[in-house]
Image (cartoon, grey):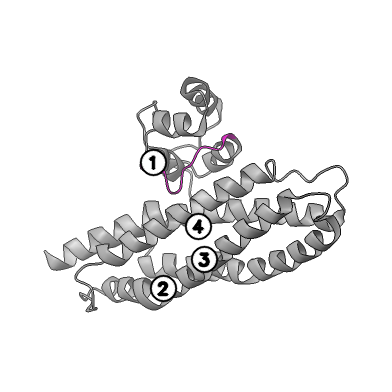
């Protein structure tokens, strides 16, 4: 694949998932902002587009015939949904309570000397408060609708088109992305302070891992699941 500054970030990651790691390190949004050109995404992240492009071109790209164990563009939507639930939804249901407990301990020990933890607490609570109902809406409304369509039968629901719940989910993804940006900023990129204890470091490491998982999670839905679901609905209706 030949890339330039007008190539969509989502297309770059789709062609080469390993590019995620580099873009993560540069703070370039490839999940909610996957529809943006590389130029737009870099400018939004405060990065020089030319430098990012040069770095990407300098990385080793896979051969065109290299097999991919995660080619979600070809797997059935039912398999993709099962992967999202078993991997990303399950991760959030385990990790959010664990991180919440760590945060309580960190606040109790370091809250007086690190007032920034009050903002971290508020942002984390907002993030968890957004994510848990979001997972339920996906699992109870959107995902069953897509699974029904994946059987080859047009699904029936209280909404006119799959676009309706997708629009809601993507709006909520944007809100989650904005909270992650704020969390990264107020934690200094998840760098624990010099006087931070093991629990403090474990909490910040956990937040960093949570951010990476959410970016991949949202990418799979915004850039692969949702477009394919729209296309499938159009085919069934046509």
Q: Is residue 149 left or right of residue 125?
A: left
Q: Is residue 121 left or right of residue 10?
A: right
Q: Callout 2: helix, strand or loop?
A: helix
Q: Callout 3: helix, strand or loop?
A: helix
Residue 11 marker: 1
Whether the residues at callouts 4 and 2 have beta carbons within 8 Å, the answer is: no
Whether the residues at callouts 1 and 3 have beta carbons within 8 Å, the answer is: no
C-alpha distance separating marks 4 and 3: 12 Å
Q: Which residues are magenta?
A: 26-35
Mark whose residue sits in front, 4 or 3: 3
Quarter of the image holding residue 25?
Answer: top right
Residue 137 marker: 2
Question: Within the magenta stretch, is there residue 147?
Answer: no
Residue appearing at x 47%, y 30% in the figure: 42
Vertical comparison of 136 with 99: above or below:
below
Question: Which residue does the numbered mark 3 point to in the structure image?
Answer: 131
- Whichever of callouts 1 and 2 sits on the residue coming sooner in the sequence is 1
């Amino acid at each position: 694949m030949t890339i330039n500054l007008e190539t969509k970030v989502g297309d770059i990651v789709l062609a080469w998932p390993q590019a995620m790691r580099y873009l993560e390190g540069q703070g370039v949004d490839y999940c909610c902002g996957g529809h943006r050109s590389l130029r737009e995404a870099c400018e939004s992240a405060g990065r020089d587009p030319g430098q990012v492009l040069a770095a990407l071109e300098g990385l080793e790209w896979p051969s065109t015939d290299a097999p991919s164990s995660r080619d979600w563009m070809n797997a059935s939507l039912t398999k993709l949904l099962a992967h999202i639930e078993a991997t990303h939804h399950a991760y959030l249901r385990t990790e959010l309570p664990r991180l919440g407990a760590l945060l309580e301990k960190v606040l109790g020990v370091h809250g007086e000397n690190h007032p920034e933890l009050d903002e971290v607490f508020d942002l984390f609570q907002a993030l968890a408060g957004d994510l848990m109902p979001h997972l339920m809406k996906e699992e109870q409304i959107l995902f069953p609708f897509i699974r029904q369509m994946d059987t080859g039968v047009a699904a029936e629901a209280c909404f006119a088109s799959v676009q309706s719940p997708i629009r809601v989910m993507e709006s909520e993804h944007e809100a989650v992305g904005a909270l992650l940006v704020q969390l990264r900023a107020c934690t200094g990129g998840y760098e624990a302070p010099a006087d931070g204890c093991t629990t403090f470091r474990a909490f910040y490491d956990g937040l960093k891992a949570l951010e990476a998982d959410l970016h991949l999670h949202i990418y799979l839905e915004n850039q692969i699941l949702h477009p394919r679901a729209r296309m499938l609905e159009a085919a069934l209706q046509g």
